[in-house]
Amino acid sequence: MRNTGWALLPGALLILAGCSGGSDAASTAASTSAPSTSAPATTDAPTTTVTTVAPTTTEPAPICVVTVQPGDSLGAIVAGLDGITMDDLLAENRMSETDIIHPGEQYDVCPGNDVDDVTGTSRLAPPPAHVEVQQAELNGLFAGTSLFELGIDGDSGPLTRQAICAARMLLGLPESTAHLPEGSEEEATIFAATSDSFTIPAGAATWSSKWILINETCQVIVTGEGADRIVDIFPTSTGTPDYPTHNVQALDAYRFDPALDNEGWHDSTNFPSEVDNPLNGNMYKPIYFNGGQAIHGAGYIPPNPRSKGCARTFPHHQDRIIAWLGIDDIVEPVWNAGAIGATVSVVGEYRDL
């Protein structure tokens, strides 16, 4: 309630000084005594002193990360926040409005602070003009692959550094998602390269006619054939530290579920949901290679680990992998490594930089 007059806070000190009334007897005596001929006594004007103690307030720390709850939508998340628009949310998390979100995923809801608040990493970039040159060179290098074309925006953010890491991997340079130093020998090597310069990355099962390499450092999937050919490169999102995608060497993909009865969306055995659809964390046409860990389509593929142990791809990328393996005509779940014909390896370790 707002008080429009004086109010004392708890613990405030109020001091009143001035005249006070006497007893009734003294008042009567004063009224019947002879009038005094001396000068009237003077009295000081009453004084009032009010001392208040100001309240101490501490601004609460802003909430910069939200976790998706079952039934959430991007619109519902934005509606529950002050001072952030849908465009802010999408730009801060490198998303589009059509991306499908999953319970348990986290999003950065403090735009404009140059920090990825989910990972705590800085988004401060090298000089934008030079980063734009790097982005253009990387787009040329990966033209024809399934890595998305970078926006020429001068932001050396996660997507640009994912492409830098992939270039390092395929050119035999030390792998990391660190910024590409301007004017460095490493930068000159990448700028001079073409897709013909790519070498099959370490860890690929090159003795297999068709192999899949999941690189957790760069958050990419590379497909290839034997020791001679790289087929494609895809963005991926592997398991979080709580649900890691385990490094493995040359495991046969042993199970494939086209889930055609539910438009390709299969309910996870380890993390089931009541309703099978992409909003509930289901897997699009999963190809299993290590227990319950699979390569599968999903609606959201950030350039950092967000999965619960699997390696995510976009659904249309998963369809490309399935078509390349020649299993796009399978209509029922199969447990047959020979029918799938892929050898899967997982290498590397993601580090926040």
Image (spheres, rainbow, N blue to C red):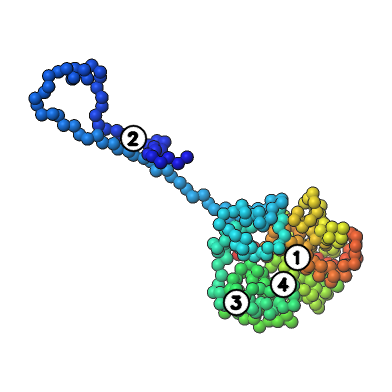
Could you tell me how many numbered marks the image carries? 4
Amino acid type, mark 1 = Phe
In this view, the residue in front, 5 or 49, is 5
Amino acid type, mark 2 = Leu
User: Which residue in the structure is indicated by mark 2?
Assistant: 14
Residue drawn at 81 percent across, 70 percent down:
320
Q: Quadrant of the C terminus?
A: bottom right
Q: Earlier in the sequence, mark 1 or mark 3?
A: 3
The alpha-carbon separation of the residues under discs 3 and 2 comes to 67 Å
Q: Are marks 3 and 4 in contact (CB under 8 Å)?
A: no
User: Which residue in the structure is indicated by mark 3?
Assistant: 132
Which of the 4 image quarters holds residue 341? bottom right
Residue 247 falls left or right of residue 342: left
User: Which residue in the structure is indicated by mark 4?
Assistant: 147
Amino acid type, mark 3 = Glu
> Which of the numbered marks, if any, corresponds to residue 314?
1
Residue drawn at 87 percent across, 60 percent down:
260
Secondary structure of the residue carrying numbered label 1: loop
Q: Earlier in the sequence, mark 3 or mark 4?
A: 3
Residue 216 visible in the current orientation: no
